[in-house]
């Protein structure tokens, strides 16, 4: 697989933690030229310092800001000489019931998860078309099945997948491949950073992270799917089971999802 990515110019948003960092690490080790962004300067500096001899372009950027997206993509095209693959990975989750939440929570999640991908893709599009490249969206099982306590997150992933499916068809004549991947529960910082009812980070996770797929394994599956130009990728047994149940037995899925996330009527996960 390494020969496929060697000397490819790859842009990964949100590359300082979790799946994003694992993607950056794997791509650099395979000889790709990589550009990534994040909101934390110190984490970007540490990442850059880890690869002094590799071609890595980094920039502090918040993908919920359109100007940041534009500047990041423009600087990446200049640094890499073009774009072969864009992986829209940056994202944030939430953990709060609608009846207890400010609407700002949903807006913030949508700005990062959906509009961040729209803006980065739009500004990168001409460069990707020029190389007949690939556009990837890191979605979620929540893009197939709405999850309680994650209404804004689910909405953002449903929107992302619908949008990617639309542009996939639009860009077929341009030779551009569009795909979306759904990791399922993967060890990362996303649940710790998940927004609460006041749009602030929770700072902890209700899940057993040790029982989840590692970010490194997830990144490996994603890059294999990119190389094979898959349409979609759903990972983990639970993820595949959830998508199957939602498609064929939605009423039963409602009950099972409720049982998983609630205890005595209270959201516990």
Image (cartoon, rainbow, N blue to C red):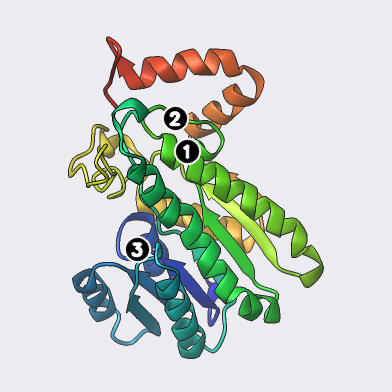
Does 238 sit left or right of 260 as displayed? Answer: right
Does the residue at mark 2 contact the one at mark 3 (Cβ under 8 Å)? no
Circle 2 sits in a helix, a strand or a loop, which is it? loop
Sequence-first disc among 3 and 1: 3
Q: Residue at x 51, y 61 (%)?
A: 117
Q: Which residue is mark 3?
A: 21
- Residue 68 in picture, x, y percent from top left: 40, 74
Sequence-first disc among 2 and 3: 3
- Residue 257 in picture, x, y percent from top left: 44, 20
Mark 2 against mark 3, which lies toward the viewer? 2
- Label 1, residues with CA under 10 Å away: few <14, some 14-19, many ≥20: many
**Label drawn at residue 154:** 1
Circle 1 sits in a helix, a strand or a loop, which is it? helix
- Which quadrant does the N terminus fall into? bottom right
Does the residue at mark 2 contact the one at mark 1 (Cβ under 8 Å)? yes
- Residue 214 in picture, x, y percent from top left: 35, 47
- Of residues 75 and 237, the one drawn nearer to the viewer in this rendering: 75
Q: Give the CA separation, mark 3 to mark 1.
A: 23 Å
- Residue 167 in picture, x, y percent from top left: 69, 59
**Label drawn at residue 132:** none
Extreme top residue here? 264
């Amino acid at each position: 697989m390494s020969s496929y990515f060697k000397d490819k110019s790859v842009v990964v948003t949100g590359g300082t933690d979790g799946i994003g960092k694992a993607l950056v690490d794997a791509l650099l080790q395979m000889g790709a030229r990589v550009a990534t962004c994040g909101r934390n300067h110190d984490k970007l500096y540490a990442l850059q310092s880890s690869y002094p001899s590799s071609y890595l372009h980094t920039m502090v950027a918040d993908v919920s800001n359109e100007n940041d997206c534009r500047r990041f993509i423009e600087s990446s095209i200049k640094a890499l000489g073009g774009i072969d693959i864009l992986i829209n990975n940056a994202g944030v989750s939430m953990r709060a019931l609608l009846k207890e939440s400010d609407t700002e929570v949903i807006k913030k999640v949508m700005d990062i998860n959906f509009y961040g991908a729209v803006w980065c893709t739009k500004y990168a599009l001409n460069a990707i078309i020029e190389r007949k490249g690939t556009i990837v969206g890191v979605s979620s099982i929540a893009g197939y099945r709405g999850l309680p306590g994650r209404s804004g997150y689910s909405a953002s992933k449903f929107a992302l997948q619908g949008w990617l499916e639309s542009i996939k068809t639009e860009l077929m004549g341009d030779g551009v491949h569009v795909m979306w991947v759904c990791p399922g529960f993967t060890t990362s910082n996303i649940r710790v950073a998940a927004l609460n009812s006041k749009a602030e980070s929770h700072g902890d996770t209700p899940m057993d992270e040790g029982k989840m797929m590692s970010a490194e394994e997830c990144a490996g599956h994603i890059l294999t799917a990119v190389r094979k130009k898959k349409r979609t990728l759903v990972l983990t047994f639970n993820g595949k089971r959830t998508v199957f149940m939602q498609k064929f037995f939605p009423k039963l899925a409602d009950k099972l999802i409720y049982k998983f996330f609630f205890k005595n009527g209270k959201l516990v996960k």
